Amino acid sequence: MVSISRKTFLKYGISFGVFLSTSQVLQYCKSSSKDRYDYERKNPFDSGFLSENISPILKSLRIGITAPNPHNVQPWKFKIIDDHSALLFVDEKRLLKDTDPSFRQIHIGQGTFLENLSLGTQVLGYSTEVSLFPEGKYTIADIGKKPIAKIVLIKQEDLVRNPLSEFISDRVTRRSIYEGEDLTQEDFEKIRKDSAILYSELKFIPKAGSEKLRKQLVAAMQMETDTYNTYEESRIWFRYNDDEIGKFKDGLSLRATGVSGLKYYFARNFFLKPGTESWHSPENKKAGMDMFASQVESSKGFIFLKTDQNEIIDWIQAGRDYLRLHLAVTKSGFSLHPMSQILQEYPEMDPIRKELESSLKPGEKIQMLVRLGMSDYHYYSPRRDTKDFLL
Ligand SMILES: Cc1cc2nc3c(=O)[nH]c(=O)nc-3n(C[C@H](O)[C@H](O)[C@H](O)COP(=O)(O)O)c2cc1C
């Protein structure tokens, strides 16, 4: 759903017999697509932010945490070593045990963080040295205990910035209905070239050849919705209103889903009620599925990101590449929305996922699958304060 204007909101509001004060109208619509509500993610390159009297490592962590990450759980914790270095750990209190039982996506989120930090810190005049698994062999049993990476910032006078770093502030996951032309092979080639990914492979599926995929994506979301624990996990991370978004500064929300203006007003006030009963009701599930199906139908093309192997290190490196892909897509003017349901590894999803993966070579894994298109909907999902991540 594209963000609607105040005029349209008022027109519909009046026809529905709804009378709102000016401040109420402002609450549901933005005056410009670039406005940010107080709770929205701040631009870590704002001059006020950059001139703050804090260490370079804290500034670079603040850039890093604006990275995309599953369900916006922000699964990171940091141990500061000194003003220019820190250790990154997975935050074991912020895992998605039902939709991500292998913890693959949580580790992709470690990679997105590392790449966002490395590219973004160039703006501060530093290059970044990232050493993975600095305490040796790392397994799933080490989550939260052993560091994923040691980060060291190195001041560099003659640093040539990667042009992708310019798009860190604007990058957002857009789940709205997409408009515009279908993505062409040329559009894809340009995105691939700009992303200059290092570890994985990108594949393009044009809209014209995507009918089967679109059906599979909807079937996968239906499975997630009908599987109590996986759907419940979304509820746990769902923030029902602006107060909750501002309080928790994490998770998903109607606003993040691309619902604004009148639809937001009605959904929030008359339809969406807190609690498991309402969440798992047939009406709520159907509304969610209808919205998802129209998102998928509006896609103008798809890209997937594949690795040769499927070990923890591949997940982290795929995350680094995914961040580059997302920045390159932002640069191109297109929007992007991951559709991870079909890639997930819980038993109920196995048949649907295996059908999608049937053409892969042994060991290969599709790590990310995204739909693309054009949209001017703007919402910057919130982030917690950097100090809340420190050990
Ligand atoms: C591994 C991974 C999987 C994701 N899967 C989905 C998904 O299936 N559906 C979705 O809407 N967003 C998905 N996202 C996007 C996140 O929800 C998003 O990055 C997060 O809410 C923060 O928002 P932002 O990207 O706008 O900063 C995924 C992100 C990552 C890194």
Image (tube, rainbow, N blue to C red):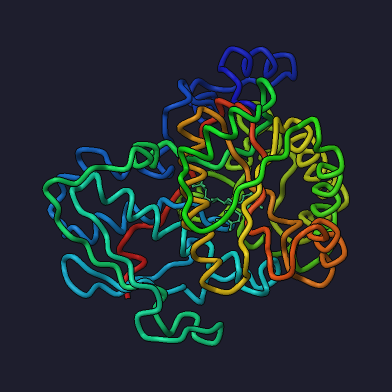
Point out residue 26 in the picture as x, y percentages from the top left corner: 49, 25
Point out residue 243 in the picture as x, y percentages from the top left corner: 50, 48
Point out residue 155 in the picture as x, y percentages from the top left corner: 14, 56
Of residue 295 and residue 226, the one placed in the foreground of this image is 295
**Residue drawn where x is 25% and y is 72% of the image:** 80
Point out residue 134 in the picture as x, y percentages from the top left corner: 35, 80
Question: Up-down: is 3 above or below 107?
Answer: above
**Residue drawn where x is 84% and y is 68% of the image:** 348
Of residue 277 and residue 310, the one placed in the foreground of this image is 310
Figure quadrant of residue 278: bottom right
Of residue 303 and residue 276, the one placed in the foreground of this image is 303
Q: Is residue 241 left or right of residue 156?
A: right
Question: Up-down: is 40 above or below 351?
Answer: above
Q: Is residue 324 left or right of residue 6?
A: left
Asked whether the viewer can see residue 248, the reply is no
Of residue 287 and residue 9, the one placed in the foreground of this image is 287
Asked whether the viewer can see residue 298, the reply is yes
Figure quadrant of residue 98: bottom right
Q: Is residue 323 left or right of residue 44?
A: right
**Residue drawn where x is 40% and y is 86% of the image:** 136
